[in-house]
Image (tube, helix red, strand yellow):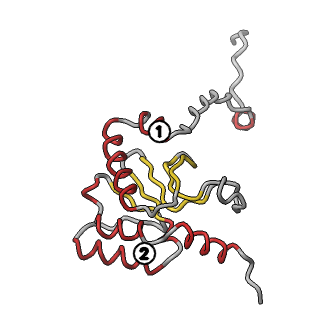
Amino acid sequence: MSTAKSTPRPNAKAASKAKPASKPKKAKPASKPTTVAAYIAGLPAHHRATINAARKFVHSHIPKGYAEFMSWGLINWGIPLSRYPNTYNGHPLCYVALGAHKSYSTLHLMGCYGDARQMAFLKEEYRRAGKKFDMGKACLHFRTMDDLVPDAVGRVIASVTPETFLENYERVKKPQQG
């Protein structure tokens, strides 16, 4: 018989209750760019070309009176707080936004979000052009400018003046009376 003490076996229940090793803290993400130029400069080259072309496209179709600014980490065209400070979330009102993601870019077309006819129009124009319609409630996804149907997208962007946009916002914002 051996007199040496054996090493105790680990208790499975005790091991499952043990505190997990602390995870390394994630580095804080870099702050979001506050200017359009800084946003574009921070993009990888393949996105920079697409975003520059899409930005130029929006500028050529957006009605006069919308301002370009950064909000939510995206390039926005909308109503700044200096003109309309009473927003539901304290952010400027966005009419169109543009951003790059890992493998695609997105045009946020808020006119489509608020108008089912515009959404149906875009969907039909994409069908007619034989192009893939990749859109959620307001976000039109594309990899290159060739993925867009420019006449249709331009028409949607051009269709709502800032005054009409604010009228629609006010109408929706007011509590329904009844």
Look at the image and tell me in which quarter the N terminus lies.
Answer: top right
Q: What's the residue at 69%, 32% (across, down)?
A: 20
Report x, y in % for residue 121: 37, 78
Res. 119 mark: 2
Q: What's the residue at 75%, 37% (across, down)?
A: 17
Name above or below for residue 117 compared with residue 58. Answer: below
Look at the image and tell me in which quarter the C terminus lies.
Answer: bottom right
What separation in Å lies between label 1 and label 2 (alpha carbons)?
29 Å
Tag 1, which secondary structure? helix
Report x, y in % for residue 165: 56, 70
Name above or below for residue 13 compared with residue 68. Answer: above
Tag 2, which secondary structure? helix
Mark 1 or mark 2: whose residue is earlier in sequence: 1
Q: Residue furthest bottom?
A: 178
Q: Nearer the viewer, mark 1 or mark 2?
A: 1
Q: Is residue 2 left or right of residue 32?
A: right
Residue 117 location, quadrant? bottom left
* Residue type (three-letter) at the residue carrying disc 1: Tyr
Report x, y in % for residue 115: 50, 77
* Residue type (three-letter) at the residue carrying disc 2: Met
Residue marked by disc 1 = 39
Q: Is residue 69 left or right of residue 177?
A: left
Q: Residue furthest front?
A: 64
Q: What's the residue at 42%, 75% (across, down)?
A: 119
Q: Label 2: how many residues lie within 10 Å, few (<14), some (14-19) or many (20+)?
A: many
Res. 161 mark: none
Residue 88 location, quadrant? bottom right
Report x, y in % for residue 168: 60, 75
Q: What's the residue at 54%, 66% (across, down)?
A: 162
